[in-house]
Image (cartoon, rainbow, N blue to C red):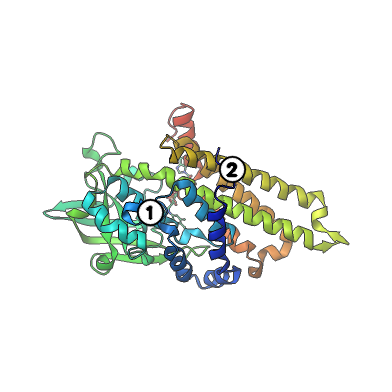
């Protein structure tokens, strides 16, 4: 079991950085639906987003445990790591499956922040969670691929230099398994936008910089294929455990933020001549939310430890994501209830974080799909979909 104090220095340093970006910073960006460029630049310059990149490529070579602590602390401080978490983990596909030349070319620049690789185009409007049915196609034509199709919810595409794209290179009716025939391409957005690629922002209930991306005969050099053609689905799956654990940590950060704000407010707000937190009807839900967040954190720590030890952790990573998303949402609801009417006022930030944390019951994988995974792969029940 990891000593909970082992990472105190890291936590402290991230907290110090986050303290420069108070509630008002995030609140104003939220109102304007603007990207937290200054915050992301600070996090990048401090090297935190390169946590998972090996030292030989200019990163800090840390584990998923440390990376998850960094993101947890961002959300724990009232910020929203969704603006930049993908810069940490999307490169994992390149690191594990890219050619030596691709790694040499891109990873050091991603580590320094000179290149932002924080857009991942998987989800499509017509096929959703059913990834193997995605419709975007990449057809090989000499030394390039010609891409046609559409992605939805491609977050941070406007704030990314590169995008990892999942496209079908062999039609689904010509493959043995539906998971075959998908490939991963590295798209250089700096040259692609306006030349076969169009990005259209989607305004959402929270500030998330997410977009739709349209491909109209976009040409991508064949050299930008990551790994082998047709094996993209496997590469995609390889990256999911890290993503699940990191998102779980963000939810734990959110949950702790909500519990802390609710606890403080419950102690300060006096109604009927006493602090509202003296009433069990107010106090107990906050205590229960705390219990849920701490329990979820145990599974997140377990998953991170297994991951960093190179051991299988699919079940634990998925369970951590499910438990942490549930716990942060429980804590968010409790915080709104504790704040009463002020829970709805922008100035208290509860409603902003409430909107932000709600996402994680749906994305990057919905709770039902995690339950389907556990039911089938952990409990051995029949495939439900
Ligand atoms: C703000 C935001 C940012 C995102 N960022 C990205 C990104 O950067 N890149 C990217 O590729 N995607 C991204 N996504 C997409 C996200 O991963 C999907 O929204 C998510 O996986 C669910 O897919 P869907 O929205 O198509 O829902 P659907 O697949 O249509 O599902 C809708 C509902 O039905 C349920 N459901 C579907 N099938 C079953 C079943 N067989 N059994 C039980 N329940 C089922 C689901 O659980 C869900 O609740 C983002 C989404 C949002 C909202």
Give the tally of numbered discs. Answer: 2
Residue for point 58% across, 50% down: 252
The reply to whether discs 1 and 2 touch (Cβ–Cβ < 8 Å) is no
Say which of 64 and 316 sits in front: 64
Quadrant the N terminus occupies: top right
Quadrant the C terminus occupies: top left
Residue 356 visible:
no
Residue for point 59% across, 71% down: 24
Which residue corresponds to mark 1? 125
Residue for point 47% across, 41% down: 369
User: Is 336 located above or below residue 309 in the figure?
Assistant: below
56 to the left or right of 384: left
100 to the left or right of 285: left
Residue for point 76% across, 47% down: 284
User: Is 162 located above or below residue 375 in the figure?
Assistant: below
Which residue corresponds to mark 2? 296
User: Is 263 located above or below residue 384 in the figure?
Assistant: below
Q: Mark 1 and mark 2: span between their CA atoms? A: 31 Å
308 to the left or right of 249: left
Query: Mark 1 CB in 8 Å range of ligand 1?
Result: yes
Q: Position of residue 25 (x, y in %)?
A: 56, 71
The quadrant holding residue 261 is bottom right
Q: Position of residue 194 (x, y in %)?
A: 26, 69
Crowding around mark 2 (Cα neighbors within 10 Å: few <14, some 14 to 19, many 20+) is many
Q: At numbered mark 2, what does the secondary structure look like: helix, strand or loop? A: helix
Outermost residue to the right? 273
271 to the left or right of 9: right
The dot on residue 211 is none
The quadrant holding residue 350 is bottom right
Q: At numbered mark 1, what does the secondary structure look like: helix, strand or loop? A: loop
Q: Position of residue 179 (x, y in %)?
A: 30, 39
């Amino acid at each position: 079991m990891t000593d909970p104090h082992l990472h105190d220095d890291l936590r402290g340093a991230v907290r110090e950085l986050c303290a420069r970006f108070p509630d008002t910073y995030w609140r104003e960006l939220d109102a304007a639906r603007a990207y937290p460029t200054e915050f992301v630049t600070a996090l990048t310059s401090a090297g935190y987003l390169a946590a998972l990149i090996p030292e030989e490529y200019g990163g800090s070579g840390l584990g998923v445990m440390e990376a998850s602590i960094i993101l947890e602390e961002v959300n724990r401080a009232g910020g929203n790591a969704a603006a930049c978490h993908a810069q940490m983990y999307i490169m994992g596909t390149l690191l594990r499956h890219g050619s030596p030349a691709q790694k040499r070319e891109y990873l050091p620049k991603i580590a320094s922040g000179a290149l932002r690789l924080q857009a991942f185009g998987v989800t499509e409007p017509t096929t959703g969670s059913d990834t193997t049915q995605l419709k975007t196609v990449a057809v090989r034509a000499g030394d390039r691929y010609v891409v046609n199709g559409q992605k939805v919810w491609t977050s941070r595409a406007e704030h990314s230099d590169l995008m990892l794209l999942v496209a079908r290179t062999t039609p689904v009716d010509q493959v043995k398994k539906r998971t075959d025939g998908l490939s991963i391409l590295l798209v250089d957005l700096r040259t692609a936008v306006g030349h076969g690629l169009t990005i259209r922002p989607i305004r959402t209930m929270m500030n998330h910089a997410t977009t739709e991306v349209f491909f109209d005969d976009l040409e991508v050099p064949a050299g930008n294929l990551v790994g082998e053609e047709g094996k993209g689905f496997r590469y995609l799956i390889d990256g999911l455990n890290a993503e699940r654990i990191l998102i779980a940590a963000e939810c734990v950060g959110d949950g702790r933020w909500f519990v802390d704000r609710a606890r403080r407010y419950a102690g300060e707000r006096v109604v009927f001549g006493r602090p509202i937190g003296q009433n069990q009807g107010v106090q107990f839900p906050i205590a229960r939310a705390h219990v849920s967040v701490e329990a979820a954190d145990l599974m997140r720590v377990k998953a991170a430890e297994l991951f960093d030890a190179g051991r299988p952790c699919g079940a634990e990573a998925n369970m951590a994501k499910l438990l942490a998303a549930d716990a942060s949402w429980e804590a968010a609801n409790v915080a709104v209830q504790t704040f009463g009417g002020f829970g709805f006022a922008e100035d208290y930030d509860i409603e902003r974080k409430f909107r932000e944390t709600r996402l994680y019951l749906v994305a990057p994988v919905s709770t039902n799909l995690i339950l389907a995974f556990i039911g089938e792969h952990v409990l051995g029940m029949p495939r439900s979909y």
